[in-house]
Image (cartoon, rainbow, N blue to C red):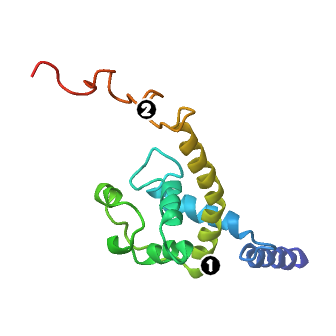
Amino acid sequence: MKFIIAAFALLLASFVLMGQSVDPDPVAEGEVVFKTVCATCHSLDPPPNLAPPMRMVIKHYLEAELEDPWQSMRDWVGSPDAARSALPAHAIERFGVMPPLLLEEADLDALMMYLKTQADSVKTMNHEMGQGMQHGNGQGMQHGNGQGMKHGNGQGMQRRGN
């Protein structure tokens, strides 16, 4: 009988402890929210799935002239609206507007904490992309002599003979 009572007490204690975490890590919890909810449509990096890659979303929100880009993203999750989007119009045209997600406040907080950790890689990505498109002299897609997509005689991508 003592064995049954002890086993029952142990079982009860394990159920109680399962619902509690000793020291929750909001970033890790946010990553779980992203992977279980957001990643259904959003990849973290290109190529896109059903929705724009999340690092591209973060990039556009950080580059937009918003008072608080993180609050804007947070508000978007619960009430998406094309008029309030920081994404370019072509992204909305391509992917449409996502459905509203009914997440608990704690899950939204954790998700934003996780997405903020991704912002550093977005800043690094922006810097690398800006450098990568240049050919050492700031000409971008041109090849140093100002010809770019032209082939020296101004023909470039134009049709010949007509």
- In the image as oriented, which residue stretches furthest toward the top? 161
- Does residue 37 show up? no
Residue at 33% of width from left, 21% of height from top? Answer: 152
Q: Is residue 53 left or right of residue 17?
A: left
60, 24: nearer the viewer: 60
- Location of residue 1 (image quadrant): bottom right
Image coordinates of residue 35 in percent, x first then y, are: 56, 58
Residue at 52% of width from left, 38% of height from top? Answer: 138
Labels in figure, total:
2
Number of residues whose C-alpha sits closer than 10 Å to that of mark 2, classed few (under 14), some (14–19) or many (20 or more): some
- Does residue 95 show up? yes
Number of residues whose C-alpha sits closer than 10 Å to that of mark 1, classed few (under 14), some (14–19) or many (20 or more): few
Image coordinates of residue 95 in percent, x first then y, are: 33, 57
Image coordinates of residue 121 in percent, x first then y, are: 63, 52
Query: Under tag 2, what secondary structure?
Result: loop
- Residue type at mark 1? Ala
- In the image as oriented, which residue stretches furthest toward the left? 162
Q: Is residue 8 left or right of residue 50?
A: right
Query: Under tag 1, what secondary structure?
Result: helix
16 w.r.t. 39: above or below: below
- Residue type at mark 2? Gln
59, 112: nearer the viewer: 59
Image coordinates of residue 137 in percent, x first then y, are: 55, 34
131 w.r.t. 33: above or below: above
Q: Which mark is residue 106?
A: 1
66, 19: nearer the viewer: 66
Which residue has dot 2 on it?
A: 142
Q: Are marks 2 and 1 in contact (CB under 8 Å)?
A: no
Q: CA distance from mark 2 to mark 1?
A: 49 Å
